[in-house]
Image (cartoon, helix red, strand yellow):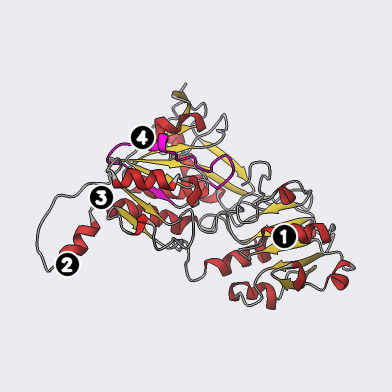
Amino acid sequence: MHMNIPSCYSFAIASLAPLLAPLRLRSAATAFRSVSYHPAPAGSIRTSVCVGNSLISNKSPTSLRMMSYWNRETSQPTSKFEGPITKEARILALCDPSDAYNKPLYDGPLPEGSKLLAVGSSLADFDQESIIVQDPNVIFVSHPKARGPLVELLNKFPSVEWVHTRSAGVDFIASDGLFSSPVQLTNAKGMFSSTLAEYCMMACAYFAKDLPRLMRQKNDVKWEQYPVLEIRGSTLGVVGFGDIGRASAKLAKAYGMKVLGLKRSIPESFSDPYCDEMYDMSGLLELVKKSDYILISTPLTEQTRGLISKEVLKHCKKTAVIINVGRGPIIDEEALIEALANGDIKGAGLDVMTVEPLPKDSQLWKLDNVLLSPHNMDMTLSFMRESTEFFIDENLPRFVRGIDLLNPVDKSAGY
């Protein structure tokens, strides 16, 4: 059943949104959580929840969500933490010691109650005898080849309680050793969403306006008009409606697009002004059938590896464009190349590939209907440093006070 709110009440609720957004609950015994308020625009159609091919209208017209996740666009930095320090944070940095983005951690100052014990990229880099007597309890991870060394550190130093990754994805450290351990895992979710959303819309425009043709005509000094497509009125399907997916949906709505989303699980009271229809995983084929642009922004897990299969690609429109900002192995790359070469889909915008760097003999280099970028569409000049600062400024003060950490990772789900 749809519930309609009188326009006067909708206006009153909307006017409170800026006041509600930055609120924080400050208590030494409870978590500091961002308050995100997303009122449905007056007169708009509210999100429909789709289980398989069945649409279930959302029961509540608005959504007031208490979330323990950081968002670079909407979250407000915590200016002061309240409550006593109840324990020290004794940190090991599983990182490249020359990583300039980690200078705030290496050089300090660190929050009260926190200290960096050592930096290294493998177990052998750490003075194990001197470190073990200090009972390290935090590991900060940024080294791209940290999977094995992290498990070795956890085995060597059982005092570790918390592991934090500087990246949003945790696939590079995923292992049975980590996921079966009792440590809490957090990540940098919300730090990179806005720039990847911008890339999503750039990829849509790249194909809608036929930018390759523009560049060829400029190179050939050729003035030749041709029709272009509107983005307005087209449909964006978002496979993985998390932080990146939602940021992309927000921009898509500004362009006048219809947005379909897909999540592993859908809260019963789900509502979002940036999503018209939400599907669970059984609705993937239905989503791709309806979509003109298909954004892949789901994390890489054993469940999502190969999710965009040859069968899924067969259900796409011939005019569809695939945009991948998640991880390369989520798509069956050989099936994608075949679909692109045969004209079964219009094109692909790929910021991630199955093997990186992309091998020089990959056919993706040669296909005219592929937009390639070297996994750098989130590489702003400050993005990694800001991610390190998030660990220092937001989560370390929580840890030493026994307050719930931001950006917890569900180890059973892999994200």
Is the residue under label 2 in contact with that under label 4 (CB below 8 Å)?
A: no
**Residue under pointer 3:** 208
Magenta region, residue range: 299-324
Going from N to C along the chain, the mark reached first, 1 or 3, is 1
Is the residue under label 3 in contact with that under label 2 (CB below 8 Å)?
A: no
**Residue under pointer 2:** 218
Q: Nearer the viewer, residue 282 or 18?
A: 282
**Residue under pointer 4:** 314
The CA span between labels 4 and 2 is 35 Å
The CA span between labels 1 and 3 is 44 Å
Asked if 193 appears above or below 322 in the picture, the reply is: below
Q: Is 16 part of what is drawn in magenta?
A: no
**Residue under pointer 1:** 150
Q: Position of residue 175 (x, y in %)?
A: 68, 50
Q: Residue furthest right?
A: 133
Instruction: Check disc 4 and report its element: helix, strand or loop.
Output: helix
Label 1 crowd (10 A; few <14 / some 14-19 / many >=20): many
Q: Nearer the viewer, residue 238 or 343?
A: 343
Q: Position of residue 293 (x, y in %)?
A: 34, 43
Looking at the image, which residue is at 45% across and 36% down?
10
